[in-house]
Amino acid sequence: MPDATTTDASVPARMNVSPDQPVPAEFDLLCEGCGYSLVGLMTDRCPECGLEFDPTLLPLARVPWLYRKRLGRVSAYVQTVRMALFSPRTFAAELCRPVRISVQDAHRFLAVTVHLAALAPVIGPAAFCEAGWGWWPPRVMTAFSGAACLGTWLGSLWILRMATDMPTFIWRGLPERSDDLSPLHHYAAAPLVLLFPAAIAFVVLLFAFQRDMIARRELSEVGVLAVCALGGVVLFLAWLEALIFMRTATRCSFGRVAVLGAYLPVHWLMMVMLVGMTFVIILYYGNEIFG
């Protein structure tokens, strides 16, 4: 566990904590199974749940997602998203302390985020098809909408996975190694999960106040602008999150942050075009073979 005074920064000494003094949060070591404080214990087993631990390891970062065994997956995920959205500087600074970050857990967080975000483009078409917004018989429309929704979800998932896989070369030349900052790439995708509730809210409001438009099988200009605005806000938050993370974690110049800010939209657009071209090629050759 880190100590305030240590001769070797790479091998922090175990901190001596007085029982009558509160443990500073940055030095606390929590059980990964139940969250019990392990500071000052002379054994290698948690007295609360019995889980063994290595007293020489650094504590886990204070990121709720890393304590999902104790908090529950849903609660830990929601708390992590909230922390990343409303306290991005604190979040990034936490991952840069002498703590265990767990690249694997960060990757799992990213996977959950993009899978949920990829559902957003599917919600609207699926709801409209179920409401009878189609030109074919119900059975044909149901089969068609199912295939279309699956294809849309897979395409959106592919785009999001590639767009959030930020290349590490943009971090090179900074004080920290690019590998050490890879979890920030994953957690920076947290705002994308807002696409899912935003899509649900849009469809609910549309059905509540625009039933006549749905009956005419139309989508007004206001509806199109609302969809673009919702998506634009979420993408802006994801863009801003990456910039804040980079600035906080590396203390780099504003010029380097500006380069990242200019590169990200280009990277996202390239990924969309790459996936789009792939789907066009698949559809073209599929039509040639089966048409």
Image (cartoon, helix red, strand yellow):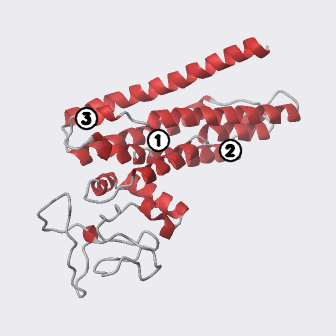
Name the spot of residue 144 as percent of width and height, x first: 78, 31
**In the rendered structure, which amino acid carries the disc numbered 2?**
Phe
Q: Nearer the viewer, residue 22 or 215?
A: 22
Q: CA distance from mark 3 to mark 1?
A: 27 Å
Q: Is residue 66 left or right of residue 208?
A: left
Q: CA distance from mark 2 to mark 1?
A: 24 Å
In the rendered image, which residue does mark 3 sit on? 172
**In the rendered structure, which amino acid carries the disc numbered 1?**
Val
**In the rendered structure, which amino acid carries the disc numbered 3?**
Arg
| 150 versus 287 height, above or below | below
Name the spot of residue 184 as percent of width and height, x first: 36, 46
Q: Earlier in the sequence, mark 3 or mark 1?
A: 3
Which residue is painted at 68% across and 44% down in the image? Answer: 209
Question: Mark 1 Cα within 10 Å, few/some/many (few <14, many 20+)?
Answer: some
Q: Earlier in the sequence, mark 2 or mark 1?
A: 2
In the rendered image, which residue does mark 2 sit on? 209
Name the spot of residue 239 as percent of width and height, x first: 38, 38
Name the spot of residue 127 as percent of width and height, x first: 72, 41
